Image (cartoon, rainbow, N blue to C red):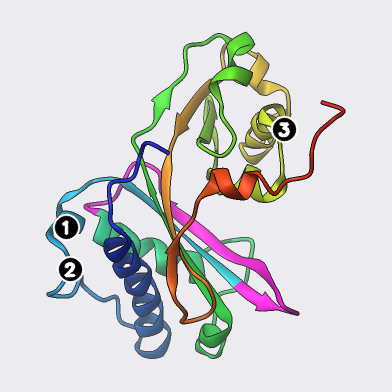
């Protein structure tokens, strides 16, 4: 992927910052500030940030919360802190997390490139939206839905399924992307994740992960 603004060390800092923000919030009710050793770039860059939290259950990871700022909040460090707390306590799909879950969850931070609107030509969307590279935002009137780049890879979707599920995420019909009145945006993301709860942090390679999806001989 072309959007890789940060080193692994900087990405690991963000993941640890996300975990610390949640720990402090759940145990002491405190929203932390970026610490003194925060790399300067993380206090300057305005990129969007999402924090994803997954819970280890039966040897598998299950989504526990995911919330973020598609177009940034103050700077990357602040966006990480606030998105992490929101993912754990404000995702309407799940009850608020408790401190006794902290040893059973994995944190992932996604740093987003600026959104880029595709020209309103639905016939070209299947070529323009690349699974393993792009995330998407679908907008129509007051409705909006976002899917991070890792979602279609984890689900082994093709571009059409990706677009259709983006429409559903926006509470629209699955084929809404075929209507020129629907706005379709793409973005890229750099992803940093714990290998296990409190474990080593690595940068995900979605292209490599996509290669593990079953072959689609019927598509």
Q: Label 1's element?
A: helix
Camera-nearest residue between 30 and 5: 5
Q: Position of residue 147 (x, y in %)?
A: 56, 42
Nearer-N-terminus badge (3/1): 1
User: Which image quarter: residue 58?
Assistant: bottom right
Q: Gap between marks 3 and 1, in whole Å?
A: 37 Å
Q: Which mark is drawn over residue 161? A: 3
Instruction: Report the predominant secondary structure element of the magenta stretch.
Output: strand
- Asked whether 63 falls inside the magenta stretch, the response is yes
- Asked whether 82 falls inside the magenta stretch, the response is no
Indicate left or right for 73 with 156 as reference. left
Q: Position of residue 166 (x, y in %)?
A: 63, 35
Camera-nearest residue between 52 and 197: 197
Tag count: 3
Q: Name the residue located 87 percent from the left edge and 28 percent from the top edge.
A: 218
Nearer-N-terminus badge (2/1): 2
Q: Name the residue located 54 percent from the left edge and 77 percent from the top edge.
A: 196
Residue annotated with mark 1: 43
Asked if the residue under mark 3 is in contact with the one under mark 2, i.e. CB atoms within 8 Å, the reply is no
Residue annotated with mark 2: 38
Q: Gap between marks 2 and 1, in whole Å?
A: 7 Å
Indicate left or right for 87 with 216 as reference. left
| The residue stretch that appears in magenta | 55-75
Q: Residue furthest right?
A: 218
Asked if the residue under mark 1 is in contact with the one under mark 2, i.e. CB atoms within 8 Å, the reply is yes
Q: Label 2's element?
A: loop
Q: Position of residue 81 (x, y in %)?
A: 32, 66
Q: Name the residue located 40 percent from the left edge and 76 percent from the top edge.
A: 19
Q: Position of residue 69 (x, y in %)?
A: 38, 49
Indicate left or right for 126 with 89 as reference. right
């Amino acid at each position: 992927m072309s959007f890789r603004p940060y080193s692994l060390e900087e990405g690991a800092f963000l993941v640890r910052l996300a975990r610390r923000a949640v720990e402090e919030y759940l145990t002491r009710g405190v929203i932390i500030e970026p610490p003194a050793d925060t790399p300067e770039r993380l206090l300057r860059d305005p990129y969007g940030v999402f924090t994803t939290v997954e819970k280890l259950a039966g040897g598998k990871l299950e989504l526990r919360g995911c919330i973020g700022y598609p177009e940034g909040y103050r700077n990357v460090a602040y966006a990480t802190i606030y998105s992490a707390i929101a993912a754990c306590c404000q995702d309407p799909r799940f009850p608020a997390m408790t401190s006794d879950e902290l040893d059973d969850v994995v944190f992932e931070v996604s740093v987003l490139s600026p959104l880029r609107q595709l020209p309103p030509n639905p016939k070209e969307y299947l070529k323009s939206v690349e699974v393993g590279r792009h995330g998407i935002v679908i907008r129509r009137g007051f409705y909006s839905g976002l899917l991070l780049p890792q979602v279609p890879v984890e689900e082994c979707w093709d571009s059409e399924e990706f677009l259709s599920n983006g429409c559903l995420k926006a509470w629209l019909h699955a084929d809404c992307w075929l209507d020129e009145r629907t706005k379709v945006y793409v973005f890229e993301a750099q992803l940093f994740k714990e290998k296990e709860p409190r474990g080593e942090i690595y940068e995900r390679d979605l292209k490599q992960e996509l290669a593990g999806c079953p072959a689609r001989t019927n598509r």
